[in-house]
Amino acid sequence: MSQAFEGVRIVDFTQVVAGPVATYQLGMLGAEVVKVEQVEGGDIARAMLDFTDFGRGEMAPAFVGVNHNKRSIAVDLKRAEGRAAVERIVRRADVVVENFKPGVIGRLGFDYETVRAWRPSIVYCSISGYGQAGPRRSMAAFDGAIQAASGMMTANGHEETGPTRTVSPIIDVTTGMMAAFAIASALHRREKTGEGQFLDVAMLDSAVCLLNPVYNNHLATGEEPELLGNQSLTKMPTANVFATADGYVQVTALTSAQVDRLLGVLGCPELREDPRFVTVADLIANRAAMSAELCARLCREPTSVWLERFEAARVPAARITGFAEVMADPQLETRRLTATLPAPPVLGRPALTSVTTGYVADTDGAEVRTFAPRLGEHTRDILAEHGFAESEIDALHAAEVVRSPADPESWPAVPASAGTSPSAAAAAD
């Protein structure tokens, strides 16, 4: 059996997070991804979020984690020779993905209409902040800006301190997932029709879809969301974050039965007889009073005690945990959500662990086959595969149209077991 996208050739003009996430997802399922990077510096994410110089300005962890299974060619697209070289690669592609500002890819000579003339069956995906049309199409877009522009921050934060954003570039990641799904759908459609397709994926659209339940409530009622802090969108006072004797616990008691069990664990079942707390509507109307009752009790015992009692009583709850604790959770080990790979010399360590994908397949699932590439690591190989003679490749290097690493040594090979999908590994056992 083969992976879902084995044999699919993708030319990847993307950088930072959203675009690379999209091609990473497809590459994890077997697609051949050629990452086209600028000769100076490459993907700007190579040096982003690298506060401790972990990746020496070239292999930042955030870059590495979404660029496994790709090959890099470093080329100057502002020069005719560079564009001609990439044209040969694009002419053999099944998919092209780009995330320049609208209009930029056209000026470089690789817009959809041009590429479609070369490859009528091409699946072409453009990723941008606001889409390829509309009054905001040319605006620069970053994750934080889209969190603000999409309404997300209107619904995220505390009344006392105002709106806030999430620490993760959640819109970038969501947009990448959306783009990967759109590309997968277009490839499936092509199997049936033989036709290619143009896909216009916008961060703003993805953000609104991510807020689907909140926006649907707004569209139905006209209500604007409130800044509820850590409360549930249901406004139930029994669904919130509470301080315990040694930390914090998230409780999510939403139904009347769950509320009854929660109050039973806390030793105050009689509160349901209080006129303020009889029905769900009563609880929402008097949520400040109920929150005070819960806070006064939950702070008396440590989190571990409450979690044990909540689990026994079937009250949904979880500890507020740090990243190190999450990564040490045996549940994640069972899921094999991460892969530990031999690390390249520049990182100065023998191995590096990366997050993989968030699902399990019983056969032929996602897997890491090769470590994220150095800038231009595969320039020579890719050009040779597309008909360039060695002398031509040397000439392009001499003219600084393309670039390869000064050190020709490749990264260590990834063991077959390192990136095996959880279920496939289990089957092998």
Image: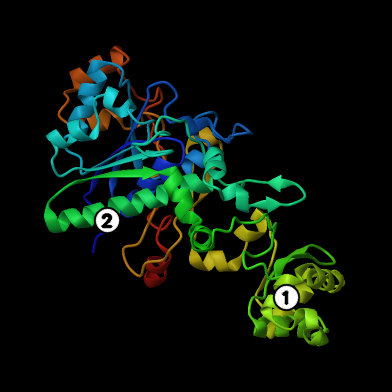
Going from the N terminus, do you reach mark 2 or mark 1 first? 2
Q: Nearer the viewer, residue 182 or 353?
A: 182
Kindly identify which residue carries mark 1.
283
Amino acid at dot 2: Ser
Kindly identify which residue carries mark 2.
185
User: Residue 111, percent across and down?
Assistant: 25, 31
Q: Residue at x 22, y 24 (%)?
A: 85
User: Residue 383, percent across and down?
Assistant: 22, 28
Q: Is residue 111 placed above or below 184 in the rendered structure?
A: above
Q: Residue at x 21, y 33 (%)?
A: 89
Q: Nearer the viewer, residue 51 or 1?
A: 51
Which quadrant would the C terminus be assigned to in this image?
bottom left
Q: Mark 2: which secondary structure?
A: helix
Label at residue 217: none
Answer with left or right where residue 161 lies relative to residue 2. right
Q: Determine which quarter of the picture holds residue 261.
A: bottom right
Q: Determine which quarter of the picture holds residue 204.
A: top left
Which quadrant would the N terminus be assigned to in this image?
bottom left
Q: Could you tell me how far apart the alpha carbons at marks 2 and 1 are, in whole angstroms? A: 44 Å
Q: Mark 1: which secondary structure?
A: helix
**Badge 1: few (under 14), some or many (20 or more) residues near its Cα, within 10 Å?**
many
